[in-house]
Amino acid sequence: MNEIDSNSPGSWRGVLLVLIVLVGMIAAIGGVWWQIAPHPPSDLERYLPNANGGSLRYRVTDANGAIHFRSSNVAQLSGTDVITGLDGNAFGSLLKILGIDIQNFDVTRAQAAINANRFVQLTEIETDPTGVYTRTMSLLLPRATSWTILKSGTASFDPPLPIFDLVNPRRQVIGKVNGSVPYTATLALENREAIDTSIGRMDDCLRVRRHIEIPGYGDETLTWYCSGVGVTREEYRVDGDPGIQRAELVSLTTPNFVKSAVLSPGKSVSDPARVITLDHNFPGSSDRALAVLWEFKENRSNNGITTPPLPVDNLLLYGTQNGSLIALNRTTREMAWRFQTGSAIYSAPTIVGDTVYVTSSDRRLYALQLNSGTFLWAFATQDSIAGSPAFADGLIIIASEDRRVYALDTLTGRERWRFAAGGPLATSPVIADGVIYIGSDDGALYALDAKTGAVRWAFVTGDAITTGAVVADGVVYVSSNNKMLYALQAQTQRSDGELLWQSNVRQDVAGKVVIAAGQLYLATSQQVRALDAATGQERWRWISRENLSGSPVRLGNTIFIRRSHDVVGLDAQTGSARWTIPGSESAAYAELSSDGREIFVGHFDGLLMVLGEGN
């Protein structure tokens, strides 16, 4: 991973460079958004649309003609989330702007005043033509008519640095960086005009000129804030240098606007080096009892883990209730990156090559760079997306509760085809031999041609299908809310979708089934069962006194299942309990996952546990 962290400590000169870079970045991304207590719509909201998880991507052309890309991602933070991360300078600046008397400081009153505000954490990633990227974290305070920057990287501003002000069309602020370096910022709202962009014509844009000076240096940015979108274009130059750097918006997602320009060069990924999806079946493993190897918990509110962690290279990727996709470095046991979506994430991502595809209950699919979490593009459906994406022949396949299956170009997110089912789709599509299998709330399992979306066949059960299908050895296994498990012939020359057998499991199946060595393992609300994969006859049954969660995981001769507050290991041949591993006191939500050596357990209090054999 080639990364330069602009948040690392630096010299006095380094702080100045952070400030120099900051102005160009903040002006360029401009689509910083927030969500505060309900209030009448304002002009500021028109030009800076408010949404947690807003993301933008820019094509930047340097004065010498070199092209690189810049992206931004917005996360809303509460006062509790930010207060522990502020240094003395930023904290003092915040107290002043909130009107808190520092000389007669009252902790309770200060905390209440800070918690009454919502803050924005802006993650800016700029990638140069060689692939080296710089990540900068900025903390902003949005108010009703203006925006200010409290901190960016290691630079803190007193008073906060203004970036947008509708009340004062011309404004000058004089302050200090990190308590010692003087700065002067001048803002001028120049004009309202229409502009043409790579994503279409924008008829209502505000042009804002911004100039900043520090000792021995000055720069100027010209920014176009367009109604309903945010910053769409930016021009940046250093005082005394005739060269101009230009940035143009090429993809974005807001609550009411999702769009991407056609970029080149590039082509869709039809045969990627790898496709990584969640797996629950691993043949080889020791029969020794597992123990907790290490734990991780992010310091943010509403951080409950809502997806099974997906192991990819040296990372663990998982989603949270607050809409974050977390990439955790398994070596350092620290967060590698975080990407904020607009709502909770309930399914594991899918990796195609070096791109992450993740769905969110904000109705969107996001495409991100794996090494950095950089936003590439988004695709919007009409309802929540509860399942993971799938990949087939250059297409990303998603199913939405708007009753549609979508096939999208891997590079651009452009729609290639869609299929309309008879009910909402709340499961992950599964692809085998060029066929997509997807269950619907209308009770049907659909088999679709992956290239065209045409229906190959459909099998109707007696109730909604809310768990994903599994395909093994030419057989499709799927459960229905009528408490039946079905085995269907996937496809032959004579028959497709033929019922081979069905079994009444008498409880709702909690997740996907796992198939190994001629046996089929499934979990219900309080049971784990093993069935003969060829006949559906029960081999054994294990009964729990507590509720079970999600699909089982097989490691060799052990079946692992999650209960409310612990993990149980069962003998795969007999169903007898081998051992129990205590978990968090927090309720379980996400199912287990594994890489074949370790078990990953996410809890609703944000705690991630990694289980393994240890030394």
Image (spheres, helix red, strand yellow):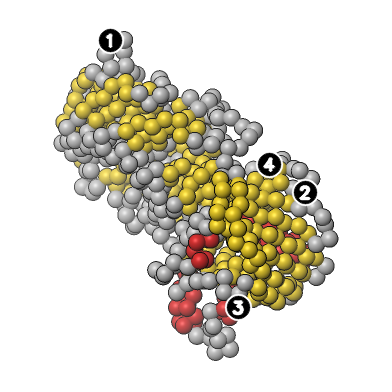
Query: Residue 421, percent across and down?
Result: 29, 33
Q: Nearer the viewer, residue 4 or 450?
A: 450
Element type at mark 4: loop
Between the residue at mark 3 and the residue at mark 2, the CA separation in whole angstroms equals 39 Å
Report the residue marked by disc 4. Answer: 131
Q: Is residue 538 left or right of residue 183?
A: left
Of the pair 485 and 211, the residue shown nearer to us: 211
Q: In the rendered structure, which disc, 4 or 1, sits on the residue that comes first in sequence? A: 4
Query: SS for tag 1?
Result: loop
- The mark that comes first in sequence, 1 or 2, is 2
Q: Amino acid at mark 2?
A: Ala
Q: Dot 4, crowdedness within 10 Å: few (<14), some or many (≥20)?
A: few
Residue 353 position in % (x across, y down): 55, 32
Residue 63: give its label: 2
Mark closest to the chain's N terminus, 4 or 2: 2
| Viewer-nearest of discs 4 and 2 | 2
Q: Position of residue 328 (x, y in %)?
A: 52, 48
The amino acid beneath tag 1 is Arg
